[in-house]
Amino acid sequence: MPISLEKTLLTIFITGLTVFFTRLIPFLFFPPEKEIPPMIQYLGRALPPAVIGMLLVYCLKGVSLAAFPFGVPEMAALAVVIALHVWKRNNLLSIGVGTVLYMLLVQTVFAGN
């Protein structure tokens, strides 16, 4: 069922406002002249690796090492992501190249299963 132009524009507007205000809130609570509380500093250090770990578990949870292709595309892409990130320290580059490699492997090399 198609959505009307008005509902589409309203959805885009509300989404834009929501993103804007969620990005604004930290600046309201922690202005530049105010020291950031130690708990927030800790969360800023601890959460990024925790989120990456959760994403890794989520991405690899369905991989079967007992059946063809034995996790080869996932492990190859993971190795490329790790190597590129250690080398270049660029999240966008490492995740992007790893994703492209994985998609190429599953759609060409391992497409027969």
Image (tube, rainbow, N blue to C red):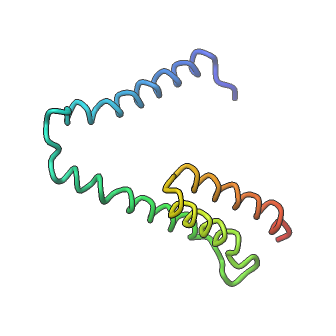
Task: Give the x, y percent position of residue 75.
Answer: 63, 72
Asked if residue 42 lies left or right of residue 68, the reply is left
Q: Establish if 16 lies above or below 93.
A: above
View extreme (top): residue: 6
Q: How many marks?
A: 0
Q: Does 93 appear above or below 22? A: below
The image position of residue 14, as x and y in percent, is: 45, 24
Q: Nearer the viewer, residue 10 or 70?
A: 70
Left or right: residue 50 versus residue 68 is left
- In which quadrant of the rendered image does the C terminus lie? bottom right
Which quarter of the picture shows residue 20?
A: top left
> Compared to 75, does 13 lie above or below?
above
Examine the image and state in which quarter residue 50 appears: bottom left
Relative to 66, 41 lies left or right: left
Considering every residue shown, the one lying at the far front of the view is: 87
x then y, percent, for residue 56? 51, 65
Q: Residue furthest bottom?
A: 66
Please tell me which residue is depicted at 30% across the width and 56% down the height of the picture. 45
- 63 vs 27, left or right, is right
Q: Nearer the viewer, residue 88 or 71?
A: 88
Residue at 58% across, 55% down: 95
Could you tell me residue 21's position as x and y percent?
Answer: 34, 28
Tell me which residue sits at (76%, 59%) in the image. 104
